[in-house]
Amino acid sequence: MNGKNLKDLEPGQKARVKKITGNGSIKRRILDIGLVPGSEIEMERYAPLGDPVEIKLKGYHLSLRKEEAENIILE
């Protein structure tokens, strides 16, 4: 999964966060909700139109917009 971001995962796939990119406010929000490098995530599902995406992180479900998901680089 080298070089992929969160929006490239299929439902049911798991991955580990490698890096968070993006500008200040988006990056800070992502880090504040617990998506930090080394975190393991699982893609739950996409909304019917593809936005938002729902992931499972540390035992809870989290919805992210496509723009935010593109900033999460996976191992």
Image (cartoon, rainbow, N blue to C red):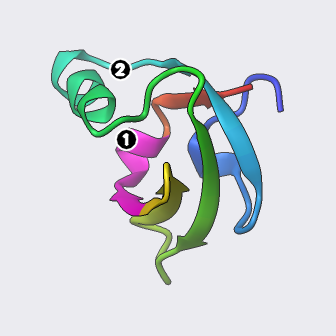
Mark 1 vs 2: CB contact within 8 A? yes
Quarter placement of the C terminus: top right
Q: Residue at x 22, y 23 (%)?
A: 28
Q: Residue at x 83, y 33 (%)?
A: 1
Q: Amino acid at mark 2?
A: Gly
What residue is pinned by disc 2? 22
Residue 32 appears left or right of 47:
left
Residue 39 placement (x, y as % from top left): 56, 32
Q: Which is more toward the observer, 14 or 20?
A: 14
Q: Quadrant of residue 19?
A: top right
Q: Amino acid at mark 1?
A: Glu
What residue is pinned by disc 1? 68
The secondary element bearing badge 1 is classed as helix
Residue furthest to the right in view is 1
Q: Which contiguous range is marked in magenta?
A: 61-69
Q: Is residue 35 magenta?
A: no
Residue 54 appears left or right of 5:
left
